[in-house]
Image: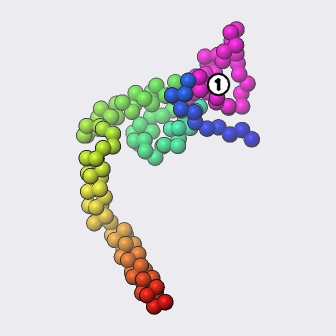
Amino acid sequence: MIAFHYIGAYISEREKLIEDGQADDLDSVNEIKAYQVAQRCEQSDMVMVLLNLAVIPDEVVQKIDFKRGWQKRFKRNMKKYKKSFPVRWKYQDEDLEVRYARFVKEAEKKDKDLAKDIEEYKTEQAKAEKRALKR
């Protein structure tokens, strides 16, 4: 059985590490031909995108076609999405964590199922503590 996994784009000559079941198609200087390098890198990048599908914006995912050269279109669509984002796009920092914690607290207040689950959990914890004290 042949397994396939992601090799990061930051790994130099990653096409030599990627095993996709195809024999190397070498040129006259014994290097893998450009078409095969591109194909292997596309396959590896596809694995990474599929593993992270849940966190890629829907409008970007819907445009992925996985046809030759898809990574360039994917990158262009992500840049376009970031430009249209309603607030300044930034990576995780302390301010973002504080705002997210505030968002979660507000969402929890509105989530009746979660409130019920928390109440049930607290009730079970109290019962368990009483049982433990009786021992």
Q: How many marks?
A: 1
Q: Residue at x 68, y 32 (%)?
A: 20
Measured as percent of width and height from the top left, residue 87 is found at 25, 40
**Residue 33 in the figure: left or right of residue 115:** right
Please say which color scheme the image uses. rainbow
Q: Residue at x 68, y 9 (%)?
A: 29
Measured as percent of width and height from the top left, residue 17 is found at 64, 29
Q: Main secondary structure of the magenta part?
A: loop
Q: Residue at x 43, y 45 (%)?
A: 55
Crowdedness near tag 1: few (<14), some (14–19) or many (≥20) residues, C-alpha within 10 Å: few
Amino acid type, label 1 = Lys
62 vs 132, nearest the viewer: 132
Q: Which residue is mark 1?
A: 16
Q: Residue at x 56, y 24 (%)?
A: 12
Determine the secondary structure under disc 1.
helix
Q: Judge whether residue 32 is colored magenta.
A: yes
**Residue 98 in the figure: left or right of residue 71:** left
